[in-house]
Image (tube, grey):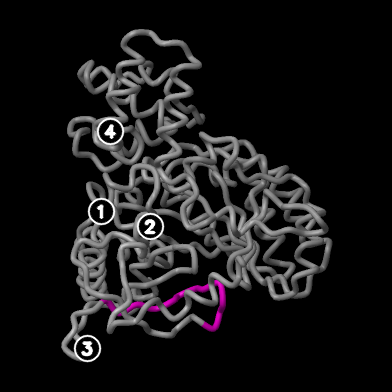
Amino acid sequence: MKYQSYSLHNFRNIKQIERLTEEQKFAIEVVGTILPFKASNYVIDELIDWDNFEDDPFFILNFPQREMISYESYDKVARLLRRGASKFEIQDTVANIRMELNPNPAGQQQNVPIFEGERLKGIQHKYRETMLFFPSQGQTCHAYCTFCFRWPQFALNDFKFAMKEADTMVRYLKANPEVTDVLFTGGDPAVMKTKFFEYYFNALLDANIPQLKNIRIGTKSLAYWPYRYTDDDDADDLIRLFEKVKSRGVNIALMAHFNHPGELRTKAVKDAIIRLTSAGVQIRSQSPVLRNINDSSTIWAQNWKEQVKLGVIPYYMFIARNTGARDYFAVPLERAWRIYRRAYNGVSGICRTVKGPSMSCKPGKIQIVGVSEVYGEKVFVLNFLQGKNPAWVGRPFFAKYDPGALWMSDLEPAFGEKEFFYKAEYYQMFA
């Protein structure tokens, strides 16, 4: 299959769109004017069930829905589009709406390091061992997820991360010997041609960085364009590059995103997984728990079991970040934990590599361990899976029980404490 993508300007050319009412098509235009929209022909032709598209998880994952933004914001943009407002008037209104959607979740801008007197806009370094690298050639995707926490990467210039200087990346790694893992992220690095992968990977290999153990690739490509690893004109070259990296003693890990077991059913994705794992690539899978998509323990258990069957390692269940269309996808923390617990109890030990549910918030990845009663007070039991300070990891702490809490910012310390144990040190880091 030859790759083709559709965006807001040409989505009406999709033949299946004829099934939608004019009102539904207009809703896509309104919401897509605020939140970026893009879909691949693989998603459209092989994933979406167009006979049941209104409830289909892959239609909802890719096509903007009316309820993804507030009624007030929708009405503002709808009125502008209906009266044929100027491009500049629409852009001004949309820019204000976007800034209300928390375009900097988890303080991502705070994680950009200053190195050699320069702010490295293509690097984030939040956790000691892991450096994120944003190759400039990989800052789009085969298709955009409607829940994406990096939607500003595609919509707001001031919030973009990108870098093309491999030598800067290498110098930063040599100056920070604690970094063992380089995570290529985006966007989606797998949209890059193999020649760009070769440029970056060869720079890392040729530098002989002794502490480099793992190169990770954060990608949705296995779910949205698995032909990247089988049929693309440079797919063979990419597989050979992965084999080369492995032969040099550096592990290659694909950090895949499978939000629903239906993404694992096609022959294309199964062929891609076989080809990658045969080349020595480790595949791990992560996803947020999402209302309207996968907020079911049965779906999660099925997802993990199918992944393991195909050779994929279940890695993380996340809480959807508090940005963009979060209110549409949000699942209360207690319910997310119960979904995780029931799913975890429904699979064998080989599937229980998964960790969660976890919030990737400003101080780190905070896991909801459970709901309990301590000294007569009902509480959330929490734990750091990753932290700005590694010493925070594995230290249980407690928050007041709140059945409506959706994110860490909704929680308060239990037992009359004024603040969580890490707060003073965290604030000091940015003093």
Residue at the image position 40 percent from the left and 40 percent from the top: 100
Question: Residue 181: x percent and y percent?
Answer: 64, 67
Q: Given the image, on which type of amino acid does mark 2 rest?
A: Ser
Residue 374 numbered mark, or none: 3
Question: Residue 221: x percent and y percent?
Answer: 49, 46
What crowding class fits label 3: few (fewer than 14 Cα within 10 Å), some (14-19), or many (20 or more)? few
Badge nearest the viewer, 4 or 2: 4
Magenta span covers which residues?
380-391
Say left or right for 216 vs 266: right
Q: Mark 2 — residue?
A: 287
Q: Given the image, on which type of amino acid does mark 1 rest?
A: Asn
Tags 2 and 1 touching, CB below 8 Å: yes
Tags 4 and 1 touching, CB below 8 Å: no
Residue at the image position 68 percent from the left and 71 percent from the top: 179
Badge nearest the viewer, 2 or 3: 3
Question: Residue 76: x percent and y percent?
Answer: 32, 23
Tags 2 and 3 touching, CB below 8 Å: no
Q: Mark 4 — residue?
A: 65
Alpha carbons under labels 4 and 1: distance apart: 17 Å
